[in-house]
Amino acid sequence: MEQYIKEELKIPLSPSVDVLVAGGGIAGISAALAAARSGAEVLLIEKQCILGGLATAGLVTIYLPLCDGRGNQMSYGIAEELFHLSISQGVQERYPNAWLENGTKEERSKQRFEVQFNPQSMALLAEELLLKNGVKILYDTRICSVHMERDKVRALVIENKSGRSAVCAAAYVDATGDADLYWLAHGDTEEYKKKNTLAGWYYQNGREGVKLRILGFADAPEDTERDKGEALLKRRFSGLDGKENSELLFASHKATLEDIRQNKLKDDSFEPVTISTIPQVRMTRRLCGEYTLKESENDKQFEDSIGMVGDWRKRGMVYEIPFRCLYSGKIRNLIGAGRCVSVDDGMWDIIRAIPGCAVTGEAAGIAAAQTCDFSQLDRRALQDMLRKQGQKIHFAEAGLASDTFPVNTRRE
Ligand SMILES: Cc1cc2nc3c(=O)[nH]c(=O)nc-3n(C[C@H](O)[C@H](O)[C@H](O)COP(=O)(O)OP(=O)(O)OC[C@H]3O[C@@H](n4cnc5c(N)ncnc54)[C@H](O)[C@@H]3O)c2cc1C
């Protein structure tokens, strides 16, 4: 390909902050909030004009379960706080009454601790919450490149209406969903080889009021109790190629338009209310961390756990998340959160759900406020702070196992 050689870079540099959070999805919101509450000066950079990423702009509005499907809550802290925030202006669907109205354990084991929320309210409420906590937000701003100084990120080059400039921080959180910072910094990353099925989730209004229309399904494991559904298209998408992303959007828009036309024939009050403004891709690229958590490691206890998730697809499958999945020692002041942490393909499909993004985001945010060298972090201090903020770290704390179990062994 023909090459364009750029001129020497000479751009304005903003004053340095303690923590820079790249991306304002659920992981970025959680990281920014946790870092700010730990006393850090935080700047969050988001290329969209609202917070929430896939969960709001992407219209993925089902807050998947905080529980293990057997009546035990697994994810706490900011994951639980954002759950409540998302429905503080009203629940859309799937009200979990057994969980929110003191149901018995038997009742809770029959109902997952999940809910459907309003994306617009969630985006506005998250912004209000971050601003109240002193987080600075820069919208409509894209991170274009990462500048390294030896084994640390020195600055990010960003672009918005003011043109190009550079921003610096002591520590950086990659909450871009696609491990963009790791990739731009030439850190070790891995792509999701299977690629993504096409989705076209949108909101519509009609005889039954405003409803979420779910077009296109994820690849579901054989033994899941969840809807399996049909793929919209045979073609799959990486989510990592500029031209391909436009083709993904064309295909998603075409499927949406066809769906609207068909429904209008049956109900002339049917009308679209909102379509997604970002590509609806689940797994794209992840960082290769100090540890890669596997789907087969359910029930395994880790000394450096930062919190837990349940499998949204299968009851009784629970995971502790090791801190080592969040960073690679090769880039000392960069940490990942959300759907781009270090996991195998099976675990990716579990941790990418909203609770996993919030749990990893919270831990990354606190860690970033504590150190600018993640390989040297005092993990006990991180766990203490997480507990103080309401997170539960090990199975025993969620009432699942005895404290006497040695770490790095199975619970059962
Ligand atoms: C079709 C579909 C259905 C799903 N269904 C569910 C479900 O029912 N329930 C559930 O819990 N989860 C579901 N998920 C998964 C879940 O929604 C996402 O994995 C989760 O919300 C991701 O959060 P995140 O913060 O890690 O990433 P994202 O939401 O992707 O946020 C990343 C943010 O970073 C910003 N960003 C990226 N690059 C840059 C850059 N270079 N500069 C500046 N900003 C940048 C983006 O604009 C975005 O706001 C689904 C996902 C999809 C695609």
Image (tube, rainbow, N blue to C red):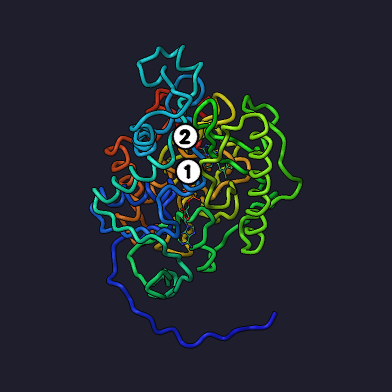
Amino acid carrying label 2: it is Tyr
Indicate the quadrant containing the N terminus: top left, top right, bottom left or bottom right: bottom right
Q: Which mark is residue 358?
A: none
- Say what secondary structure mark 2 lies in: strand
Q: Is residue 56 left or right of residue 269?
A: left
Task: Return the residue found at the far right.
Answer: 234
Q: Where is mark 2, residue-wise?
A: 63
Q: Quadrant of residue 173?
A: bottom left
Q: Which mark is residue 55?
A: 1
Q: Are marks 2 and 1 in contact (CB under 8 Å)?
A: yes
**How far is the residue under mark 2 from the one under mark 1?**
8 Å
Locate residue 312, reporting x and y percent: 54, 31
For marks 2 and 1 on the same chain, the one whose residue lies earlier in the sequence: 1
Locate residue 343, reporting x and y percent: 56, 47
At x 52%, y 32%, the residue is: 211
- Front-lying residue, 92 or 297: 92
- Say what secondary structure mark 1 lies in: helix
Q: Residues within 10 Å of mark 2 (few under 14, many from 20)?
A: many
At x 52%, y 67%, the residue is: 184
Q: Is residue 177 left or right of residue 20?
A: right
Indicate yes or no: mark 2 CB to ligand 1 under 8 Å: yes
At x 37%, y 50%, the residue is: 31
Up/down of 302 relative to 176, above or below = above
Up/down of 307 relative to 46, above or below = above
Asked whether residue 45 appears in the rendered view, the answer is yes
Q: Quadrant of residue 269?
A: top right
Q: Quadrant of residue 141?
A: bottom left
Asked whether residue 218 appears in the rendered view, the answer is no
